[in-house]
Amino acid sequence: MEGVQMGYAPASAEFDAVLREQLLERRDKLQEARPRIGFDPDLTRLLNEVDAALARFETGTFGLCEACHDPIESERLISDPLIKLCLGDLTQKELDRIQDDLQLAAEIQKGLLPKRDDLSCEFWNVDLAYQPAGVVSGDYVDVIRQNGELYFILGDVSGKGMAASILMSNLHAMFRALIPLNLPLCDLVQRANSLFCESTLANQYATLICGKLNGKGELEFCNAGHLPPIIVGESGTVQLESTGLPLGMFCDSSFISSGAKLNPGETLLLFSDGVTEANDEAGDEFGVSRLIESINGSLGGEPTDLLQNCVSSVSGFRGNAVRNDDLTMMALKYTGSGN
């Protein structure tokens, strides 16, 4: 069905164990609510559905479609472990409802993007490009002003579809809540990593760059397994190679920060792997070298022009090949000293 992007990843014992634990927790919460609520048909129905799902674990049929007995799409199980049918056995009405849910999720995601009026400030001119490969995206991008500094985050959640979009929204909420605490940048990312670990499955993670800029052109950033950002100046480009483990790999991971100083007119460019891993019809990847070539025509230019050149180069390289990943870019140009 057009617009509904779901993929099946083979289930594992660890995957099943996590979903079973979620169902047990859900049953405990429903049973705790029963004495307070009394008889309620919806609560009783939910309890019966949870018990039936847990029973499918005992019989070895959890995650298998009740109609065709093929595996149910894993992303749908992550979103709702109570489902019993794969996409191929849903009615048209049920498929239409999924499509409506995806469209609503897409609108919610668009609402989480930073507002254009919030992108730039007195010393920084900022723009971004955001192109989901499907209806919803697993890429995360945000800009937040805090105490005279400009915080920026760009990340990419593992996987695709609804499950990745839910985790993207989770990251957005976490950083929006943590940044006002004014933690040192390393502690901020470490706290986000711990929270992310607690809310994801063991095989889910996110690569991410979180940083902050001030009016003097000073940059501090933590790179959690993401592609190196690039400083773009009139004389060329410089990649900032520092990196660490992605968020969600280990709950007790620690992170280090790196720094740089931008001169007036220089731009910091961040991007997701939907840029560098874009494929042409022959299966070749766009790569970092082609990205840098596309930047050369925008040295010293404005963020909007820089992003348009990069996105146009990726699109021209891809040709008629199907877009296989979300594409997100952010350009932050330092306009002058804030002494």
Image: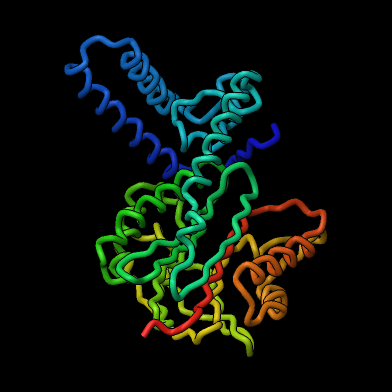
Residue at position x 81%, y 58% in the image = 319
Direction from residue 284 to residue 36 in the image, left or right? left
Residue drawn at the location 55% of the way across and 20% of the way down: 66
Whole-percent x, y for residue 224 in the image = 43, 67
What scheme was used to colour the molecule? Answer: rainbow
Q: Residue 130 vs residue 188: left or right?
A: right
Instruction: Name above or below for residue 43 compared with residue 233.
Output: above
> What residue is shown at x 70% (from left), y 35% (from top)?
2
Name the residue nearer the viewer: 191 or 19: 191
Quadrant assignment for the N terminus: top right
Q: Position of residue 296 (x, y in %)?
A: 70, 80
Considering every residue shown, the one lying at the far bottom of the view is: 235
Task: Quadrant for the C terminus, please.
Answer: bottom left
Looking at the image, is 25 positioned above or below residue 233?
A: above
Disc count in the image? 0
Q: Position of residue 278 (x, y in %)?
A: 70, 61
* Residue, far left: 35
Q: Quadrant of residue 214?
A: bottom left
* Residue 261 coordinates in the image, percent (x, y): 44, 86
- Residue 53 vs residue 169, the one in the foreground: 169
Nearer the observer, 63 or 235? 235
Query: Is residue 197 among what the camera can see?
Result: yes
Q: Is residue 259 visible?
A: no
